[in-house]
Amino acid sequence: MIYASLAPLVAAAILILLVPGLLLAWATGVRGWVLAGSAGPASVTLISVSAILAGFAGLPWNILVVLAVSVLLAVAIFAVRRLWPSSIRRRGTRSGRTSRNWNGIFISWLAMAAVFAVLFWRLGQVFGGPENISQTFDNIFHLNAVRYIVDTGNASSLRVSGFTASNGIGGFYPAAWHDVVSLTQQLTGSTIPAAVNATNIAIGGLIWPLSCVLLATSLFGRRRTVVVSSCALAAGFSAFPFLMVDFGVLYPNLLSIAMLPACIALLALALRVARGLALPPGSAWILLLGALPGLALAHPSTLLAFFAWTYPAVLAAGVAAFRLWRPRFGARPTAATLLIALIVYTGVLTIGWKVLRPDEAQSTWQPVQTLSQAFGQALTSSPQGRPIPWLIFALTLLGIWALLRQRRHLWLLAMFVVSGLMFIIVSGYPFGSFRTWFGGVWYNDPFRLAALLPVATLPVAVFGAAWLADLLRGFLHDRLTARKAPVLREWVSGTRAKTASVILSVLALCGLFVLSQGGAVSAAVRSAASNYAVTSDSPLVSRDEMTLLRRAGSEIPADNVVVSSPWTGASMVYAISDRKSLTPHVFGEYDASTIEILRQLNHAGETPEVCDAVRKLKAYYVLDFGTREVHGGHHEFPGVQNLEINPGFRLIDSEGPAKLYKVSACGA
């Protein structure tokens, strides 16, 4: 059973994703939801930055490197707090603490346990089995990159992409997700597919809900209504986390978007446009600076989303600063500082928007619908034609109305509008420079923008839920206390009020989770699960091909290289069989020997240059997975075709149409 098999691996992934960040956040002095919600982003920063530092220092990559960096940094921060009198020292130890309302604490953490259980269950349905892989194009790179990290001991984002080039030199690639998976694999000794699935469950099932709760509580306080609704709604969107384990597959975006709500919360607390939690701005700034590098190294596009989504919050802080512009002592410097920060923030966003984007030639995604359809999908949280999550839609409308009526957190509504407009433009506006200016950061891909919608929608819907709960609570209290029955008064405001509150909270928790897991989530799970099913005609690796790959590791010498067409999925021999592939990704920079083999290997007995290349690279084995490609295309690799009629190749093993050959024409 997938859940029993993956549970120990998920536990290991959770420890990896939380412990380093908990050390850092604890040293900063925060507790409660701030501690829990900021731990994930801080851990990702510590892991990904440690990987780069280890690469420079020549240290082998492992969990001890991360722990060493984490402990050193935590000790340094703690020492600064103790030795340097500041607001961080005086007040930081109380920041973000939960109150000692044990009933509220119990309900809050029960809600967190429930959302983790629900998302573990749902993501388990998606993956189907612990060893199943996403049958999608991008997964070739992701799984082989993890194998490269494990093999070389180098997890630096400056080097990871080197496995796609014959010379081993690659450019920058955001490898935070791959770093985390590699640590999970090392710590548990599992296969790479199992480590991938376990890590993704930890990200989607725990880091995402914790991040959502931090955002909601930073805005609306740590009332149990806010926490419970945040947890329930975090599991109710079809666009996240399910879309990022379905389409692409976009695992780095899964990690970065899961961190985004926490980063928004920390900025809002630092700017004091959110006051739901008692956190000194100094502590918030430290935690934010500790989270943003991880966000960038998970995926830079989400860092730009952070700057764009939070621009309304910065404007709100700027407006507040302008109102503080008084000649009295202390007000003018504060206002001037915030206004200068607003100008700098605008500059950073503008420059980043121009620079941190892929080449325009890669932004080829076309619009998929009309503007009106895109508007409706953004408003109803049903992007890409998914069913409408009626609970979230209703609470979103309530939240919009309540925020406007109370004139609270208007920047939050502006963030909701910015998020929706970005999706509408990319999803429905005609292809051209205007659309590319907004969507080029995401390759003009509406799927990537769709996955970001829940980040801005969730806090609006949570406010709607909290407003509705307050309304119902007041109505019931007034009606019941007006009655003369002593028993009712005792349950409402007497000695049994706390018991009644806990019972109602548990019932509300159950009801919200049941309602959140409706048709929208079920459809998202079915769609994603279809990409993990191992069948006779799976797009990337079929059932027969997977069976052969799992045997190939015992049939191919460890120092040999396997030749294949990467488009057929045969290059997954690197991730699954732990045997090097001549073409570990569909894209790469190949040297002359590699090109010679791919073009002429089937003439090995006739062309001496081919055998010279085979001996040089030790490319003595060939995987023939036919001509069916992951995207249904056709790419010529003549050197690996028609081997069954070539006397220079010996069949070593086969499973159905999948075959493993040895190049006998060139000796061994």
Image (spheres, rainbow, N blue to C red):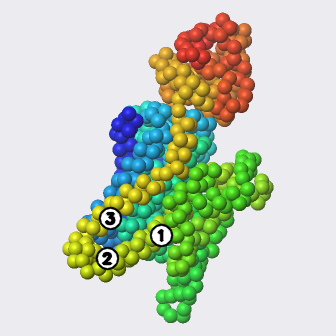
Q: Nearer the viewer, mark 2 or mark 3?
A: 2
* Badge 1 or badge 3: first in the primary sequence: 1
Q: Which mark is residue 463?
A: 1
Q: Which corner quadrant holds the C terminus? A: top right
Residue drawn at (59%, 60%) of the image: 380
Residue that carries the numbered disc 2 in the rendered image: 480
Q: Secondary structure at mark 2?
A: helix
Residue at 25% across / 70% down in the picture? 498
Element on which disc 1 rests: helix
On the image, which quarter does residue 104 sit in?
A: bottom left
* Quadrant of the rendering where the N terminus is positioned: top left
Q: Is residue 482 above or below residue 282?
A: below
Tag 1: Cα neighbours inside 10 Å, few (<14), some, or many (≥20)? many
Q: Is residue 325 visible?
A: yes
The amino acid on which the numbered mark 3 sits, given as a three-letter code, is: Leu
The image shows residue 130 at horizontal and vertical percentages of: 43, 34
Kind of residue indicated by mark 1: Phe
Sequence order check, earlier mark of 2 and 3: 2
Q: Position of residue 5 (x, y in %)?
A: 37, 35
The residue under the point 57% across, 24% down is 536
- Find residue 21 and name its label: none
State the residue in front, 406 or 261. 406
